Amino acid sequence: MVWTLVALNVALYLWDRGGSVFGPRTVFSDLGLRPAELIDSLRGSEKSPLVTLYTSMFLHGNLWHLVGNLLYLGVFGPAIEQAIGPWRFGLYYLAWGVAAVLAETFVSPHSSVPIIGASGAISGILGMYLVLFPTNRITIWFFFNEFDVPAYALLGVFFLKDVLLQTPGVANWAHIGGFLAGMLFVQLMGGRDRVLARYVRENRSLA
C-alpha cells in the first residue's frame, strides 16, 4: 500500500502538470481544500467542497514538496503498514489526512488559501510510529555525515517544530492534527501492546 500511494502521488503530480516535472499546476488547481469554503458548505452553501477533504492530500505545490513527503512515507510507512495491515493502513491514511485538514480548518476557518499535500496524512504515520517504535534507530545524513538517531528524537523534533516554530505558508496545524490522530489510532486499535503483537506475528510469518 505504501508504494501504491507513492505511485499515485507521483502520477497525479505529473498529470496535474501535463507531464512536466517543474511546470505549474493546471489540471487540479480547484481541488485543494479552502477552509472558508468548507465552512460555508457545512452552513448550507450551494458549494460542496467536501470532496477536497480527500483530493487535497494527493496534490503538491512543487517537486520538492512531493519529494519531501514521499521520503517520509517511504521511510516510516512500511513498518506501520506491516503492523496494521495494508487495507487498514490505506483507510487510516485517508482518515489521518482528513483529520489534518480539519485541524487546520478549525484554527483558520476564514482562510481561502488552499491546503494541499500529503504531509497531514503522513504525519499520522509518524504519530503512530512514535508510539509503536520510539527506540528504532533512523539513519539521517547531515552535511555528508551519517548519523543514527532514535525515532523519538527525530519525530519529537518534527512535532515540536510545528508547535513552537510555525512556518508561514505551511499548514502547521495540519501536521499537528495528523500526528496526534496517528497517536490516537494506536489507542483505538487496543493499545501499543496489541498492535505490536500483530506486528510480531507478521514478522514471524515472513521469516
Image (cartoon, grey):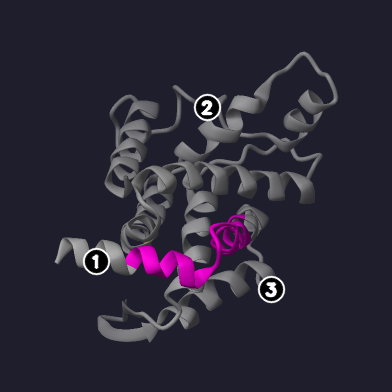
**Residue name at image x 32 percent, y 45 percent:** 1
**Residue name at image x 51 percent, y 41 percent:** 94
Residue 135 is inside the magenta segment? no
**Residue name at image x 28 percent, y 28 percent:** 19
Magenta range is: 178-199
N-terminal of the pair, mark 3 or mark 2, is 2
- From the image, tell me which residue sits under label 2: 29
Question: Mark number for residue 203?
Answer: 1
**Left of 70 or right of it: where is 174?**
right
Q: Which amino acid does label 2 sit on?
A: Ser
Report the residue that reaches farthest toward the top.
46
For the residue labelled by badge 1, is the local secondary structure a helix, a strand or a loop? helix
Mark 2 nearby-residue class (10 Å; few <14, some 14–19, many ≥20) = some
154 is higher (above) or lower (below) than 97: below
Residue 110 occupies quadrant: top right
- From the image, tell me which residue sits under label 3: 164
For the residue labelled by badge 2, is the local secondary structure a helix, a strand or a loop? loop
114 is higher (above) or lower (below) than 141: above
Residue 195 is inside the magenta segment? yes
